């Protein structure tokens, strides 16, 4: 497992997945290592990350090019904007990818990977703040703004920072099965990795805060009355605006349509209940305003890309992960 770093890399992009692979070794027999991990850089000198900490690489890029590599991990960070324009890095990544079984990127590392042309025509994930830059700079890449990681064999790309942990857990599961991933998750005191389709955002982060008091009051009403009538006419009346005007100003000030916002808040509330309670799906569907389990199921599949039952099995708090 080769991790490529460069000046100005993001430390957590390196350490999150690196720790997962280290745990895979420590949890099994010492005479049967699961992963051999090495950090490489353009020179043997210490490489300084964005947080000021420095990492001493195990090998130079030139030395690593002579070794068989199973998985290449390209980390992200502010410095990626410079190295993605450096032929030394671009050519090295392209050459290493040709001989690797898997090629992965964490966070904005997708920019360097895209610069090689290897992601053309593929679905790709990256940190939300780099999505527009990636799409604009590499129009042949199919940038998806929501998932935390995407698998498009042999390329795996992930969203920002701690999503690298989810990506690494998925790689371990792909290599050694779900039980190995669960044991590592338990050791790290985290839940099993989020599925790749999990959203990077909550509704509150995705929606802009409106400037009008009447719209903020409506948002508060929505959150507290999910099982009420939250149709456009009902909410427009509460805001004392015409339906047309309410619809227009709501979208202008939040960046979302009324219907999309209501659905997102309901999904988020259902996710919290699925994570933290043992309530049945029928009760959750009613209390969150979906009406029926079938409607909640369809909405979850569309918005979260897993069923409510699958979501609960992965993320319910208090469930013991592992054996």
Image (cartoon, rainbow, N blue to C red):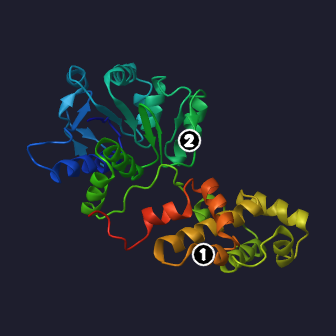
User: How crowded is the residue under tag 1: few (<14 C-alpha within 10 Å), some, or many (20+)?
Assistant: many
Residue appearing at x 58%, y 34% in the figure: 142
User: How crowded is the residue under tag 2: few (<14 C-alpha within 10 Å), some, or many (20+)?
Assistant: many
- Residue 19 location (% of width, % of height): 25, 50
Q: Where 12 falls versus 299 (above or below)?
A: above
Q: Nearer the viewer, mark 2 or mark 1?
A: 1
User: How many marks on residues?
Assistant: 2
Residue appearing at x 54%, y 26% in the figure: 120
The one of 282 and 15 positioned closer to us in this rendering: 282
The numbered disc on residue 131 is 2
Secondary structure category for the residue under label 2? helix
Q: Would residue 310 be visible to someone looking at this image?
A: yes
The one of 289 and 51 positioned closer to us in this rendering: 289
Q: Where 29 falls versus 207 (above or below)?
A: above
Which of marks 1 and 2 precedes in the sequence?
Answer: 2
Residue appearing at x 35%, y 41% in the figure: 9
- Residue 117 in the figure: left or right of residue 187: right
The one of 77 and 33 positioned closer to us in this rendering: 33
How far apart marks 2 and 1 lie (CA) works out to 34 Å
The numbered disc on residue 146 is none
Please give the residue where the numbered disc 1 appears in the rendered image.
284
Q: Looking at the figure, which quarter contains the N terminus?
A: top left
- Residue 52 location (% of width, % of height): 29, 48
- Residue 297 location (% of width, % of height): 62, 62
Outermost residue to the left? 31
Secondary structure category for the residue under label 1? helix
Q: Quadrant of residue 7?
A: top left
């Amino acid at each position: 497992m080769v991790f490529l770093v460069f000046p100005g890399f993001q430390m957590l992009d390196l350490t999150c997945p690196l720790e997962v692979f280290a745990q895979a070794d420590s949890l099994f027999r010492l005479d049967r290592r699961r992963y051999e991990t090495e950090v490489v850089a353009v020179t043997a000198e210490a490489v300084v990350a964005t947080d000021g900490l420095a990492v001493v690489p195990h090998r130079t890029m030139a030395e690593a090019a002579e070794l068989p590599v199973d998985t290449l991990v390209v980390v992200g960070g502010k410095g990626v904007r410079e190295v993605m324009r450096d032929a030394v890095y671009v050519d090295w990544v392209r050459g290493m990818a040709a001989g690797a079984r898997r090629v992965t990127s964490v966070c904005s590392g997708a920019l360097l990977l895209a610069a090689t042309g290897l992601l053309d025509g593929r679905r790709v994930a990256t940190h939300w703040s780099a999505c527009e830059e990636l799409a604009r700079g590499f129009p042949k890449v199919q940038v998806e703004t929501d998932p935390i990681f995407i698998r498009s064999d042999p390329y795996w790309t992930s969203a920002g920072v701690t999503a690298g942990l989810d990506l690494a857990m998925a790689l371990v599961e792909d290599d050694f099965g779900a039980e190995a991933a669960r044991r590592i998750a338990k050791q790290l005191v985290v839940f099993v990795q989020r599925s790749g389709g999990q959203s990077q955002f909550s509704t509150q982060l995705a929606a802009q805060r409106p400037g009008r008091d009447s719209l903020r009051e409506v948002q508060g009403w929505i959150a507290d009355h999910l099982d009420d009538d939250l149709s456009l006419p009902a909410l427009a009346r509460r805001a004392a605006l015409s339906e047309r005007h309410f619809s227009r100003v709501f979208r202008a000030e939040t960046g979302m349509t009324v219907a999309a916002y209501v659905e997102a808040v309901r999904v988020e509330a259902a996710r919290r209940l699925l994570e933290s309670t043992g309530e049945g799906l029928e009760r959750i569907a009613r209390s969150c305003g979906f009406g029926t389990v079938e409607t909640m199921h369809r909405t979850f599949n569309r918005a979260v890309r897993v069923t409510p039952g699958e979501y609960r099995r992965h993320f319910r708090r208090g469930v013991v992960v592992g054996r």
